[in-house]
Image (spheres, rainbow, N blue to C red):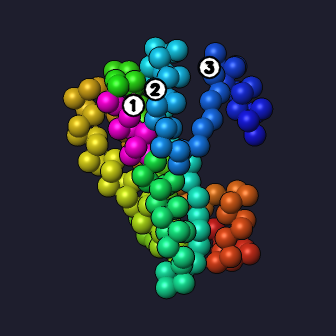
Amino acid sequence: MKALLTTTMASLSGEAFTLDVSDSSAGEQLIQLGKKHHGFDLIVHNADITRDKNLGKMPEQWWQQTLNINLLSVIRINKSLLSQNSINAGGRIVCLSSMNGIAGQRGQTNYAYSKAGIIGYVANMSRELSSKNITINAIAPGFIETKMTKKCPLLPERWDVV
């Protein structure tokens, strides 16, 4: 996957850079990268995890881990980047939410909570960032079949598209 990212970014005259968003230094790592490239025009927050279990049976660490990666890392990274003016005027921030953040899903309370949090965070930040000519948006895609979603125990084997 990293090879594909590297190839794609090279074709766009860009640089592939991956990091652990749960690491408290992730924002600082991005700031250092941004200094090499005169800041960022686009930031896409697309890291997420699921830790599915009914709420009453969910271990506390699953709740915290999901919240940390899906929501709090976005807030921490943006706070770091914005405090150092690392996102250029006219820049764009895109945050992946989910339809589960709008409508919920049985067995995914932690995931839905974190994705609903993204929607609220973006709504709040959009007002502040507009004065800096930076836009922030959340997108909430529906079900996308990936390696991660294939592991979801609560999903039916067959999806009917209406």
- Horizontal side, residue 154 vs residue 89: left or right: right
Task: Classify mark 2: residues with Cα within 10 Å, few (<14), some (14-19) or many (20+).
Answer: many
In the image, what residue occupies the spot 39% across and 31% down?
A: 81
Q: Is residue 143 magenta?
A: no
Compute the Cα span from label 1 to label 2. 6 Å
Q: Which mark is residue 81?
A: 1
* Element on which disc 3 rests: loop
- Horizontal side, residue 88 vs residue 33: left or right: left
Q: Which residues are magenta?
A: 74-83
Badge 3 is on which residue?
14
Q: Mark 3 or mark 2: which comes first in sequence?
A: 3
Compute the Cα span from label 3 to label 1. 19 Å
- Whether tag 3 and tag 1 are in contact, CB under 8 A, the answer is no
Q: What's the residue type where badge 2 is placed?
A: Ile
- Magenta stretch, main secondary structure, is helix
Q: Is residue 132 above or below residue 27?
A: above
* Element on which disc 1 rests: helix
In the image, what residue occupies the spot 68% across and 76% down?
A: 153
Q: Position of residue 114 (x, y in %)?
A: 44, 61
Q: What's the residue type where badge 1 is placed?
A: Leu
Asked whether residue 15 appears in the rendered view, the answer is yes
* Element on which disc 2 rests: helix
- Whether tag 1 and tag 2 are in contact, CB under 8 A, the answer is yes
Q: Which mark is residue 31?
A: 2
